[in-house]
């Protein structure tokens, strides 16, 4: 396989991108390993506004996976999918941060494992406390 990633600062945002090409094979049977995408890519853009506030957006793309049909147990090609998100954080004090994330912005219907639908659009929040 091949993996590469980069992070760089643009004038207004910081960008992070990654790409993986994977040939995962069962050497005994000569078949591809299940649920390992041949291609996976992601991109994130975020901006630090100062005073501990940052916002970002990103997306992840998965393509060319093999899986097992949950009903027949036959090998099948998994669907490709793209999932987008937005997120933000506020570092309230050096010990406390508030974080929020909206995941699967376009309510994409996909299955990471055949027969088990992934969660649709969702919102998540957290308080991080370090000491």
Image (spheres, rainbow, N blue to C red):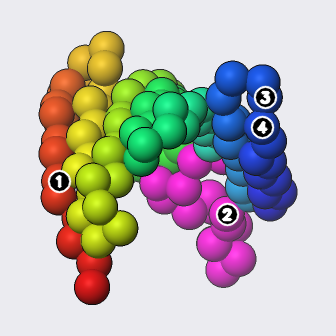
Secondary structure mainly formed by the magenta segment: loop
Q: Which residue is mark 1?
A: 126
Q: Which residue is mark 2?
A: 24
Q: Secondary structure at mark 4?
A: strand
Q: How far apart are labels 3 and 1 at the CA level?
A: 28 Å
In front: mark 4 or mark 2? 4
In reply to whether residue 36 is colored magenta, the answer given is yes
Q: Secondary structure at mark 2?
A: loop
Depicted 110 relative to depicted 8: above or below:
above
Q: What residue is shown at x 17% (from left), y 58% (from top)?
A: 127
Q: Which residues are magenta?
A: 24-38
Q: How far apart are labels 4 and 2 at the CA level?
A: 33 Å
Q: Which residue is mark 4?
A: 9
Ranked by sequence position, the earlier of labels 1 and 4 is 4
Q: Position of residue 122 (x, y in %)?
A: 17, 31
Mark 3 vs 1: CB contact within 8 A? no
In front: mark 1 or mark 2? 1
Q: Position of residue 74 (x, y in %)?
A: 36, 47
Q: What residue is shown at x 50% (from left), y 39% (from top)?
A: 50
Q: How far apart are labels 1 and 2 at the CA level?
A: 36 Å
Quadrant of the rendering where the N terminus is positioned: bottom right
| Left or right: residue 127 compared with residue 64 | left
In reply to whether residue 128 is colored magenta, the answer given is no
Q: Secondary structure at mark 1?
A: strand
Depicted 99 relative to depicted 107: above or below:
below
Q: Secondary structure at mark 3?
A: loop
């Amino acid at each position: 396989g091949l993996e590469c990633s980069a992070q760089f600062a643009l004038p207004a945002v910081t960008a992070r991108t990654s790409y993986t090409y994977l040939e995962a094979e069962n050497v005994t049977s000569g078949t591809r390993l299940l649920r390992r995408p041949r291609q996976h890519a992601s991109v994130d853009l975020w901006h630090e506004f100062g005073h501990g506030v940052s916002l970002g957006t990103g997306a992840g793309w998965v393509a060319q996976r093999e899986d097992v049909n949950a009903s027949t147990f036959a090998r099948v090609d998994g669907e490709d999918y793209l999932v987008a998100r937005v997120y933000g954080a506020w570092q309230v004090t050096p010990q406390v941060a508030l974080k929020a994330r909206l995941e699967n912005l376009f309510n994409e219907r996909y299955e990471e494992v055949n027969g088990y639908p992934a969660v649709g659009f969702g919102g998540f929040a957290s308080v991080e406390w370090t000491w």
